[in-house]
Structures are given as C-alpha cells and as structure tokens.
C-alpha cells in the first residue's frame, strides 16, 4: 500500500499569511493526488484534484502543485474560514490512502 | 442538488455487527461509485472501500476485507456499509462519499458515529 505523509502536523499562522503544506507519497503516484479541508464536526470538502485542479467553487487563493512523490498545497492570504485540518489523498491505486493531516491553526 | 444522508448513530457490543446506510438524491445513482471512509475520534481519515453502483464490484482495504461488506439498493438510491465482528477500535465516525469516477470524493454524507463498547 502507498503511504502518505504530511508535514507539518500543526501549522500556526495569521490571517493574511501565505502558507504551504506538504504531502509525500511512499512511491510515485504521478498526479493522482487530492486535497481536502475538514472543519470540526463536519465532513471533509474536496478542494483540489489531479494535484493542481481547483474543484468548482473553491476560492482561487488555494493552489496545488507537484507530481510523483512530492506535493504542496498553498493558501494565499489566509482567511478566518481557512483555519481547519487539511488532508491529502492518493488515488493512484487501491487501496486509496490519506495523509495524517495538517492542522492549520491561528 | 446532490445530497447524501446517512443513518443515525449506533452503539454495539464487541463482536456484533453494524449497518450504516447512505441515501442519495439529486443525481443518477448509477453514474457514480461510492467510497466509505472512517475517522476515529480526534484522528485522521481512513479509506475503507469502494463499490461500483452499476456492477456491484467492490474494493476493500486489506485490513477490513474479511469483515466489510458494501452493497447498494438501486431502487432506493441507497448505499450500505456492513461491518461485523466489531472491536473497540472500530469506534469512529463513518462517512459515505460519492466517487467522482476519478477516485476523488466530491460529495459526502454527514457522518455516522458508531460506538463499540461493552
């Protein structure tokens, strides 16, 4: 199975900051990577798929990049609504797998 | 609009089984597969399995494949997750998530808390 590792586990930032979250795969997944945002008590929300394609309705301050084994999620000009936990997910092969998450806190 | 509505919270004793349902509306049920994802309290997301709503084919995480059964009822546009031989570490929120047909999860149910306790 493919292992996904996110860093950092916790990231402290302020409104208006630019932040970058990292996700690494244990083997190449080409560009088959998605990012999700989850707020407490809620289901995750799809933000980005195919490493860099923004899901409809997601603000343009979110962007993704990477391929192979190294991927990043960048959020420009953090807004209060962006403080949440972010998960990456590989869908290159079954079993699909998630990273352990990065909690973005104020 | 696409909606996925899950059944309510369940409490089971170790060794018992549980069924969680996920009723859909707002789209053609047969055009998208379903994934099931669980999340232990305060922990990360764990993919459990996938079902093709048209063919009934399934894929499961290796650690769960002996205990997990995924099914659908196309007449009611509902997906089901059955987990048997429950253990305390199966205590979690269980989510259904529609597959975009590319492997991403574009719509989610609200989650169902399953508590396993003696």
Image: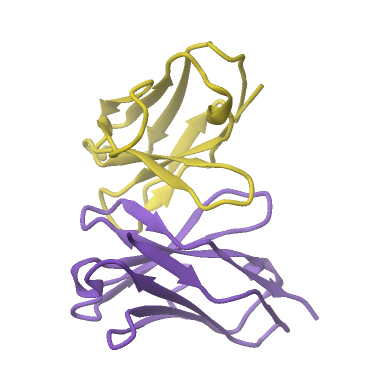
Chain colours: A yellow, B purple
| Residue A104 x/y as whole percent | 59, 27
| Residue B78 x/y as whole percent | 37, 79
Residue at x 54%, y 76% (from the top left corner): B7
Residue at x 55%, y 30% (from the top left corner): A81
Task: State which quadrant residue B93 falls in.
Answer: bottom right
Quadrant containing the N terminus of chain B is: bottom left
Quadrant containing the C terminus of chain B is: bottom right
The answer to whether residue B62 of the structure is visible from this angle is no
When the figure is inspected, residue A86 is found, relative to residue A41, above or below; the finding is above
Task: Say left or right for A15 vs B31.
Answer: right
Residue at x 29%, y 39% (from the top left corner): A55
Task: Say left or right for B68 vs A81.
Answer: left
Nearest the camera: A93 or B54? B54
The answer to whether residue B46 of the structure is visible from this angle is yes
| Residue B34 x/y as whole percent | 33, 67
When the figure is inspected, residue A63 is found, relative to residue B51, above or below; the finding is above
Q: Which residue is most to the front? A: B1
Task: Say left or right for B64 vs B14.
Answer: left
| Residue A23 x/y as whole percent | 42, 31
When the figure is inspected, residue B34 is found, relative to residue B70, above or below; the finding is above
Q: Which residue is most to the top? A: A17
**Number of numbered tags placed on the structure image:** 0
């Amino acid at each position: 199975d493919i292992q996904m590792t996110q860093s950092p586990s916790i990231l402290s930032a302020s409104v208006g900051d630019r932040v970058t979250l990292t996700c690494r795969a244990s083997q190449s997944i080409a560009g088959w990577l998605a990012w999700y945002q989850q707020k407490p008590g809620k289901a995750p929300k799809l933000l980005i798929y195919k490493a860099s394609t923004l899901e409809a309705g997601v603000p343009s301050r979110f962007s993704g990049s990477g391929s192979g084994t190294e991927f990043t999620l960048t959020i420009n000009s953090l807004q209060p609504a962006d403080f949440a936990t972010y998960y990456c997910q590989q869908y290159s092969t079954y079993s699909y797998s998630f990273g352990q998450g990065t909690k973005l806190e104020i | 609009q696409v909606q996925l509505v899950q059944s309510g919270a369940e409490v089971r004793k170790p060794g018992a089984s549980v069924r969680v349902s996920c009723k859909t509306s707002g789209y053609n049920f047969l055009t998208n597969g379903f994934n099931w994802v669980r999340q232990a309290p305060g922990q990360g997301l764990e993919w459990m399995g996938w079902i093709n709503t048209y063919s009934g084919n399934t894929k499961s995480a290796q650690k769960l494949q002996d205990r997990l059964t995924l099914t659908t009822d196309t007449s009611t546009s509902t997906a089901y997750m059955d987990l048997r031989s429950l253990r305390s570490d199966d205590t979690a929120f269980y989510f259904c998530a529609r597959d975009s047909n590319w492997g991403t999860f574009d719509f989610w149910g609200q989650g169902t808390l399953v508590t396993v306790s003696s």
